[in-house]
Image (cartoon, coloured by chain):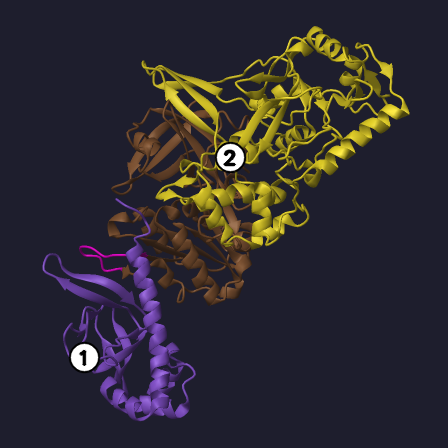
Amino acid sequence: MATALADPMIARPFRVQRMRQETSDTFTVELTPEDGGPPMRFLPGQFNMLYLYGVGEIPISICGDPTAPDSLLHTTRAVGLVTRAMRQMRPGDVLGVRGPYGNGWPLAEAEGKDVVLVAGGIGLAPLRSALYQLLAERNRYRKIVLLYGTRSPEDILYRRDLERWRAHLDLEVYVTVDRASGQWRGNVGVVTTLIPRAPFTATNTVAMVCGPEVMMRFTVMELLGRGVPAGSIHLSLERNMKCAVGVCGHCQCGPIFVCRDGPVFRYTDIEPFFGKREL
Amino acid sequence: MVAVQFNLAEHPFCKGLQSEYLEFIASCASEVSFRADKIIFREGEEADRFYLIQEGRVALEAFQLEGGPVVIQTLGPGDALGWSWLIPPYKWRFDARAIDHTTAISLDGKALRERCNSDPGLGFEMLKRFAVVLEQRLQATRLQLLDVYGRR
Amino acid sequence: MAGSRAGDAAAVVLQPDGLDALIAALGEAGYRVLGPRERDGVVRVDEVASSADLVHGRSARQSPGRYRLEDREAAPAFGLGVGPDSLKRWLQPSPLTLLTASRNGAGIEITPHRDDPPKLAFVGVRPCDLAALGRLRHVLEAPRFADPDFVRRRERTFVVAANCIEPADTCFCASMGTGPKASAGYDIGLTELRSAEGFLAESGTTRGRALLARVPSRPAEDADLAAAEAACAACAKAQTRSLDAEGIRDDLYRALDHPRWEETAARCLTCGNCTMVCPTCFCTTVEDSTDLSGRHAVRVRRADSCFTLEYSHVNGGSVRHSAMSRYRQWLLHKFASWHDQFGESGCVGCGRCIVWCPVGIDVTEEVSAVRGRVPAI
């Protein structure tokens, strides 16, 4: 399954294969091992610490296909010191990768059930990995539904993937934007409005949610309102991370370390703390 | 009108309504359909009907000088379209346009309004249901306003 | 752990000059010896060449936000409570270089950095600090990840504990079950015998026993053991601060919205002194930088505090923005979440945070207040 970590504090050099601009502020970097060693095997939902020489390190979810790990993919917004520097990288440049860390989405638990993926904004990245895995073993699951909301049509990620998935006859894809622009003829409204009518059986579903925390809070409310058991809802949390191995303290949320106990959490395990203001 | 009453009773909006109210509402109801892109109503027009969407999608739009109409929200099967018939000055606030071929149950808002005034029991049932619709719509709109996906 | 439990090793009594002999023996065994020394009006832990270097004839008056050294006749050898230093200053040094990197063509080469730390012997370690070392070991030597630098330093550390016979006003180790007598974790444990003018010395490890054998002593008699026991018991009784350790975790989780947090936040400067002096606070951060040529980069680990805004920074802002949330985080982690994470309390009752808080916030008072109980004074 996931590659054992040789030394979890030391990064492995990876070479940039390709840089891809996804939207005005979001890009994807495709990496291969520089030492010619084996590709990094990972579970959908896990993340890496990407080290930019002399600049710093940041945690980013792995968003590629776990069944085809030769290309290691990470999508991120360019919003801080490290990510803005990363955006300037060119094919051939080298950066360091530590990982994979954390736990993955509960795909085994979803076998024999409907699977609902609810993605908000860049939250689609770690869910894309899950979707690749789910589709690779399609007959293990019943209905698969993707609900994806983002800010505007210009902010839609992975358009080609979305179109390909739409073409699957055994996969339901719903896309919505908060605000329309130009010639958008698709859905307008927050992603939570897609939940009441999405085609899945609430009592036999595993829901996987990723996006800004406020979006996840309201998504959970809608899912619960639909009758999805609280224990069947899983969220991917994000906190400040420095070490990714549970010793620097930064990623704590109540008693949990997001890097070590997560980033994927069953809602019932974090319910007392999730959504508690400033905890 | 029996066929309409049957559909009406199953619509989420009408769940739990007493049969005498259902009967009255059914008497104000008719089945309608709109082809894709048809304007259902325009901002400023008299609001004397409302619609319970059965199939298809409807876009609520606001017209702006530059760039033409902007979609504010998309409604779908099970949604109630329009509440301005219940609230003075009974004029539509937005344009509504069918996105796809859409079928709906169209209800005579004016007649319903008058009956609500004379029968508070019916009035209360209507207001209860619209309060829920308004709350959901407001909640969704607020989330849109929060612009949760971040700055550019 | 180097050395094993000494089991039934007999206790001995060191004569007054036994301390010098102990320090010398440690030096001969290749250790750099450190102990309490006075510097800048405070008791710090620094290198000592003999017992003459230790603090003599002084006592430390400690109270919320206040620390004063005063003259005292016939002061006990280790009767000064704790100063701001604890073992983490040496076991988790800040800054610490983690790796260096250099450019070679288009590639980068990353080299892990490995310190070769000296062997250190600490004389006069209080039981609360020993307990704190135990807490740190559970955090930093966890099954999933053990910090190699911490392990290396810890293995090269020799501990001569000094059980407490006099508490400071700010001590509450008895409530927390961590003192005033150390039960384990030391190589040698000393208890001062005022009447016998010497130290009862017990070994806690094989290497402790070996070192003790090289120091002149006489066998301990029952009277010596009884005197040591009584001295520690008296110390426990004399502690003026206390906390009912039972059920703190649940009480704090229930009190997340207690108005007390805001009241305390109004006093708290979020200066982070408490986290710096606390012997169990372990949070660190990393910094990356290059030299001017850009050809060499280095990553350094530094001590960090949950009281900074940057600590909880995510895209969009800090999760814990208000002072209230940061104070609550620290107290909640120390007394509640630590139980969930490591199965024990994060607080060892040393009282340092009370002394070194510029506004004198007292955690025993705070915990009692949010639990709705009156603190025992």
Colour brown maps to chain: A
Residue at position x 24%, y 49% in the image = A154
Please name the residue that numbered disc 1 is placed on.
Answer: B89
Give how far across and how far down residue C71 sits, in percent.
Answer: 62, 20
Q: CA distance from mark 2 to mark 1?
A: 64 Å
What kind of element bears circle 1? loop
What kind of element bears circle 2? loop
Foreground: B150 or C10?
C10
Q: Which mark is residue A257?
A: none
Quadrant in the picture for residue B48: bottom left
Foreground: A1 or B70?
B70
User: Residue placed farthest to the top in the image?
Assistant: C28
Please name the residue that numbered disc 2 is placed on.
Answer: C357
- Label 2: few (<14), some (14–19) or many (≥20) C-alpha neighbours in 10 Å: many
Dot 2 and dot 1 within a common chain: no
**Residue range (magenta):** A176-186
